Image: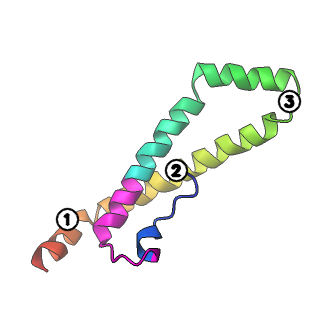
Amino acid sequence: MLKRDPESALKNGKHPDPITEINFWKDQSQDLISICKQLSSERIKKVLKFLEQNKSTYTGPFSKLQKEVQISRAEATENFLYLETLLDLFNQLTDSA
């Protein structure tokens, strides 16, 4: 999820329109919000507490992953919110083409 690339369609030889970019960030944001909710659940908090108490080597990488997901979620949400303001203009452009 963290490695998904908004330019993948372009790199695969397709010619996506700006609405494709908006939809990418919308989907990415929704997916990462869902993952963040799962990572902040009580079940995961218990697992993390157990790892910390037992000085597990997984504690650091897991905490790092949680932070990376939070940062990526914020970025995706912000990108979507900014690009969404242009949606009507992009629709006008694609409708007139």
10 falls in the magenta region: no
The mark nearer the N terminus, 1 or 2, is: 2
**Mark 1 and mark 2 residues within 8 Å of each other at the beta carbon:** no
Q: Which mark is residue 88?
A: 1
Local SS, label 1: helix
Q: Is 96 left, or right, of 39 in this rendering?
A: left
User: Which residue is at 68% across, 44% downward?
Assistant: 65
Return the residue at label 3: 56
The correct choice, above or below, for 68 with respect to 89 in the image is above
The residues tagged by marks 2 and 3 sit, at their Cα atoms, a distance apart of 28 Å
Label 1 Cα crowd, 10 Å radius (few <14 / some 14-19 / many 20+): few
Three-letter amino acid code of the residue under disc 2 = Ala
Q: Which secondary structure dominates the residues rendered in magenta?
A: helix
Residue range in magenta is 11-26
Viewer-closest of 76 and 7: 7
Report which quarter residue 54 is drawn in: top right
Q: Residue at x 59, y 29 (%)?
A: 40
Q: Residue at x 29, y 62 (%)?
A: 85
Q: Residue at x 54, y 37 (%)?
A: 36
Q: Residues within 10 Å of mark 3 (few under 14, many from 20)?
A: few
| In the displayed structure image, the side of residue 72 where residue 58 appears, left or right | right
Q: Which mark is residue 74?
A: 2
Return the residue nearer the eye: 38 or 78.
38
Under circle 3, the secondary element is loop
Reply above or below: 90 against 64. below
Answer with the quarter of the image where residue 78 lies. Answer: bottom left
Residue 47 position by quadrant: top right
Structural crowding at the residue carrying mark 2, measured as other residues with C-alpha within 10 Å and reported as few (<14), some (14–19) or many (≥20): some
Name the residue type under label 1.
Asp
Quadrant where the C terminus sits is bottom left
